[in-house]
Image (spheres, rainbow, N blue to C red):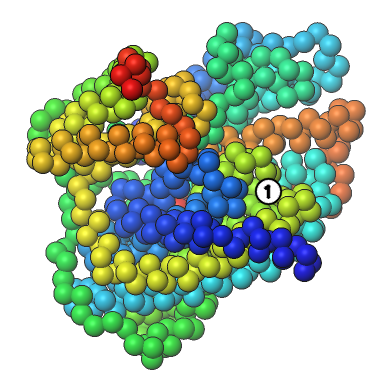
Amino acid sequence: MIENISYALDLFLSVENFLVIGIGVLIGTIIGAIPGMTTPMGVALVLPFTFSMPPVTGILLLLGVYKGGLYGGSLTAILIKTPGTPAASCTVLDGYPMAQKGQARKALDIALYSSCVADLISNISLILFAGVLATFALRFGPPEFFTLIVFSLTIIAGVAGPSLTKGILSACLGLMLATVGLDLVYGTDRFIFGNFELMSGLNFIPVLIGLFALPEIIDRSTRGPRIGGAQRSQLGGGATLAEFRKTLKSVVRGSFIGVILGAIPGIGGAPAAFLSYSEARRNSKNKENFGKGELEGVAAAEAGNNGVAGATMIPLLALGVPGDVITAVILGAFMIHGLRPGPILFEDNLPMVYALFMGILLSSFYLLIIGKIAIRGFSKVALIPNRILYPIVFVLCVYGAYAVNNNIFDILVMLCMGLVGYLMLRLDIPVAPFLIAFVLGPLLEDNFRQSLLLSDGSLSIFVRNLICIAFWILTALSIFVLVRSRIEASRTGKASTLTTGG
Amino acid sequence: MTNKKTKDLITAILFIVLGLAAIFSLIPSGVIVPGSVQISALSPDFWPYTIAWGVVISSCFLLLETFTLKVPEGDEDASEDAEYKLATLPATLRIVILIFALFLFYFALTTVGIVAGSIVLMPAMMLYFGERKWKYIIPLSILIPIGLYLFFLHVAGIPMPLGIFETLL
């Protein structure tokens, strides 16, 4: 244990690591604050810059962007009623009315403090639970991993958009695309059609950039200039410690809601923020003030939103299963460096895991410092017009896609995936299940085939023990709940609260 | 039929066609199955066929959903779609032009390289998106591609292709 921590300190204590976390949080905050730029897009654009870095440094940079992005969304949500991220739309409810009253600074301060506390709680949960879960997952063989991935994909397909069926279709597309290349067992061609560039399959990064950045650029080309929210009002005075203390109960509750929902694959920040907000309102003495500029409302929304950040890393690090698009990108970063998250990572690379934990903890403090600066300076970043922003983003995409393999073909893949992503956007098909299925596809197929090799082709291996059966039951239960919620939504005419709306 | 229902219907039909095309054409012609396969579930085409059937079955469910279930409030986004009304060119034509330009850019890359290609593309895109201030367009279009080229070359050790300009350096 002590030896591992000592190795971890060796890995972690470097100027580069301290710098990249700060830079990551800074980039994330800026990206999060720009309406139209999403955190996954930001992480995808930063990913190519990590290729030449050591694994810990590269992954910490991405984590910094992730955390900064979650917070950055709240800046514009409060100041100009334009949430930078979907999860920040809950912060608008009370943050913007506060800004209109001339209390923007107070709302921004509370949003920052709540984000930092929630982030810290989430990080500690990650440190406490990831190892335990990984130890348990050491008992998993191919059939257990197969059923776990089926369960994760079902949840992600169900909650990533308004329709479970569309989510499944999206995941199927991702799985199909993942089969391109040489067959894992026999080494024969699959969908190569004579193009040798496809023999090693499609690279994850051009697919990711194409799916997440290009559709937004294409889509925005048809729209007029962004309609800003209200004019930026006077910032007013900051929040006092006493005011923050009053919201602390909601912050802690919201943080735990974020942790629990974040640890379940696919849920993400938006539902956590809304659930935390509604719980705060239900338990508050000032119920009637919610929606009109209640400090506790801002705190609860931000706590729920940021509480997911560390928790989404639990299934990724412990099981190797990404819970959302950003953790899927981080999984990609691990793979680029020849590492595979999961129980084996805890066995073989424990010092690296500890080094990551140290960096993750440090990111909470960076968030506080950079957040304070952001309140003063970066809110203007949100006003960069799309007509300048998107051409710059496109050029970044081109450089990033090329840098993966020094191959121009990857730029073509990115453009084609951009078209697919745009079509999916117009047809309201969520892209998250596509991407996660694309990442997990080879793992799913590999575990399926390994299981059948072990059992001489008998499918009974997929119900060989309680773990497999439990995952099948959870999968069936998830489908039942999601289908019932859709039927209920059709009857009542109100959208389901289980979904994130794409 | 509402906007969302139309989208669902198009999605269902599109995916049924895709699924059937995969089952009857793409998989038989695109997946090579060796003769030595003993367990059919281990065959290289088993997984693609399973996914393709999954696509067809899910699409049929979506079709059923379109005709039997109502669209919940809030899932319709009329205001978003209303933004597509443009004063200049119809939205669809703008998209077609942009996509065509992006693919043209890709084919030009092989000759002129990424840096020069980006220096030409950036101002074109900015103008297309509506920027008219040359004091922003010119410096950004030159500095960003060159700055990124230098970053990738010196920090990441990745030389971007310069095409016909390679000989100039």
Left or right of A167, for residue A179: right
Q: Position of residue A46 (x, y in %)?
A: 44, 45
From the viewer's perspective, is residue A403 above or below residue A110? above
From the viewer's perspective, is residue A354 above or below residue B6? below
Left or right of B122, for residue B107: right
Residue shown at 71%/32% (left/top)?
A445
Residue shown at 69%/11% (left/top)?
B32
The image quarter in which residue B153 lies: top left
Q: Can the viewer see residue A483 in this picture?
A: no
Residue lying farthest to the front in this orientation:
B169
Give, as a three-letter code, the residue at label 1: Pro
Query: Dividing the image into 4 quarters, which one contains the N terminus of chain A?
Result: bottom right
Q: Which residue is mark 1?
A: A341
Residue lying farthest to the bottom in this orientation:
A242
Residue shown at 60%/48% (left/top)?
A55
The image quarter in which residue A440 lies: top right
Q: Can the viewer see residue B126 in this picture?
A: yes
From the viewer's perspective, is residue A311 above or below residue A388? below
Q: Position of residue B128 (x, y in %)?
A: 17, 31
SS category of the residue bearing label 1: loop
Task: Pick the residue in front: B28 or A450.
Answer: A450
- Label 1 marks which chain's residue? A
Task: Pick the residue in front: B78 or A196.
Answer: A196
Residue shown at 79%/59% (left/top)?
A135
Task: Pick the residue in front: A393 or B96.
Answer: A393
Marker count (numbered): 1
Left or right of A175, for residue B34: right
Q: Residues within 10 Å of mark 1 (few under 14, many from 20)?
A: many
Q: Position of residue A333 (x, y in %)?
A: 57, 43
Q: Position of residue A351 (x, y in %)?
A: 71, 58
Left or right of A369, for residue B139: left
